[in-house]
Amino acid sequence: MPSPSARLAGLGLTLPPVASPAGAYVPAVRDGDLVWTAGQLPLVDGRLVATGLVGEAVDAERAAQLARIAALNALAAVAAQAGGLDGIVRIVKVVGFVASAAGFTAQPAVLNGASELFVDVFGDAGLHARSAVGVASLPLGAPVEVEVVARVAAPARDRAEA
């Protein structure tokens, strides 16, 4: 089976630089073999690629693409804590927030953009628990925000001590 980094390359994707925090927090925190990300937005080259409410200014299909971008940013944050993409063992939980117009109820379809990326990159280890939440607004006017919890491999020194 190809490695996650080989699968990512096969999709024509590369991990972006980890987004700089916009406040008093860090992009990801590792505790033991788990990494939690801060909410990741659909940023490309440090710029938000779309704004507005899903179901109004942004359609569900475009929002799913934006969720995929946010998920790629989350992978970059996890990989930075895991010593690289191949240090990620499993995607455990995904929480997605969708800035939703009144009456919009397809949040799960939007979050499929993120979920499908994780399965494309990690196979069965990319299957995860998930919450898809509609909200009134998100930071910077973003249509979507994605958080991830991932299990990562122990650092080499820890494996040698075991």
Image: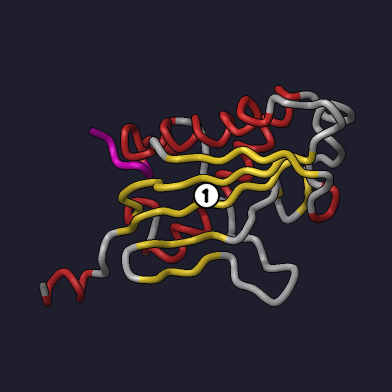
For the point 85% across and 48% down, the residue is 141
Above or below, comparing residue 99 to residue 16 in the picture? above
What's the amino acid at mark 1? Answer: Leu
Which residue is labeled 1 in the image?
15
- In the image shown, does 151 or 85 lie closer to the viewer? 151
- Colouring chosen for the image of the structure: secondary structure
Image coordinates of residue 58 in percent, x first then y, are: 82, 29
Highlighted magenta segment, given as a residue range? 1-5
Pick the quarter of the image with the C terminus: bottom left
Residue 67 coordinates in the image, percent (x, y): 64, 38
- Magenta span: chief secondary structure: loop
- Residue furthest to the front in view is 103
Q: Residue at x 44, y 58 (%)?
A: 79
Quarter of the picture holding the N terminus: top left
Q: Position of residue 86 (x, y in %)?
A: 33, 51
Q: Nearer the viewer, residue 93 or 117?
A: 93
Residue drawn where x is 55% and y is 45% of the image: 72
